[in-house]
Image: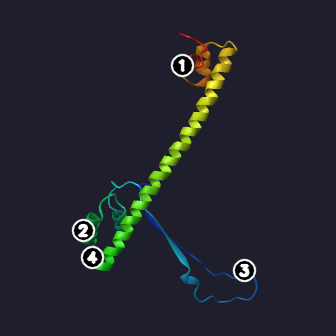
């Protein structure tokens, strides 16, 4: 989710602190941690200065698994044994799933916006007709509705309120 220049790796971990009462020691608290790796969105940006991020960006590119394997071997010295190839294939499939999910979300978002715009257009049509029926001139209706005179005229023709 990072911009073109904002790749990063962040570690999140627990730290023990006694606020009240007897101090106690939790031996393995330092082992409870997580890592967030932020990758850049644009595939055409220059290679990351961080080798792990650069490898991950290579893995998630929109290219065939064979091209990715060759680049990982050539550019990063990754040894392509059976286990590595299997894991890369899993990651390549994961990147395809991520792309498909992004596409589906984009389609859903587009449908939602279309519905909202349809509702807005319906509301606009109602306001245009009400203003026209109140005797307001088409030019004034267009100005108050923030649309062109042609759009107002089309709405009024559609509703058979004018015949021009």
Residue occupying the point 26% across, 74% down: 77
Callout 4: SS: loop
Residue 57 versus residue 96: which sits nearer the camera?
96
Q: Gap between marks 4 and 1, in whole Å?
A: 64 Å
Q: Earlier in the sequence, mark 3 or mark 1?
A: 3
Disc on res. 19? 3
How many numbered marks does the figure carry?
4
- Residues at marks 4 and 1 touching, judged by CB atoms closer than 8 Å: no
Residue occupying the point 59% across, 20% down: 143
Asked whether the viewer can see residue 114, the reply is yes
Is residue 54 shown above or below 14? above
Q: Is residue 114 left or right of residue 91?
A: right
Q: Which percent across, then down, holds residue 10?
A: 49, 69
Q: Which residue is mark 4?
A: 80
Q: Is residue 162 left or right of residue 106?
A: right
**Which of pointers 3 and 1 indicates the residue nearer the eye?**
1
Q: Gap between marks 3 and 4, in whole Å?
A: 51 Å
Q: Which residue is mark 1?
A: 154
Q: Residues within 10 Å of mark 2 (few under 14, many from 20)?
A: some
- Residues at marks 3 and 1 touching, judged by CB atoms closer than 8 Å: no
Q: Which percent across, then down, holds residue 149?
A: 54, 17
**Which of pointers 1 and 2 indicates the residue nearer the eye?**
1
Q: Which residue is mark 2?
A: 70
């Amino acid at each position: 989710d990072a911009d073109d220049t904002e790749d990063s790796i962040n570690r999140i971990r627990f730290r023990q602190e006694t606020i009240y009462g007897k101090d106690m020691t939790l031996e393995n608290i330092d082992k409870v941690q997580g890592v967030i790796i932020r990758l850049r969105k644009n595939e055409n940006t220059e290679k990351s200065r961080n080798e792990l991020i650069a490898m991950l960006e290579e893995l998630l590119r929109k290219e065939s698994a064979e091209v990715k394997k060759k680049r990982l071997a050539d550019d990063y010295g990754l040894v392509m044994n059976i286990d590595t190839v299997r894991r890369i294939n899993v990651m390549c499939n994961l990147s395809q799933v991520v792309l498909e999910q992004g596409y589906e979300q984009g389609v859903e978002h587009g449908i939602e916006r279309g519905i909202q715009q349809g509702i807005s257009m319906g509301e606009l049509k109602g306001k245009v007709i009400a203003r026209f029926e109140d005797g307001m001139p088409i030019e004034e209706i267009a100005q108050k509705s923030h649309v062109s005179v042609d759009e107002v005229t089309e709405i009024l023709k559609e509703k058979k309120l004018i015949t021009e």
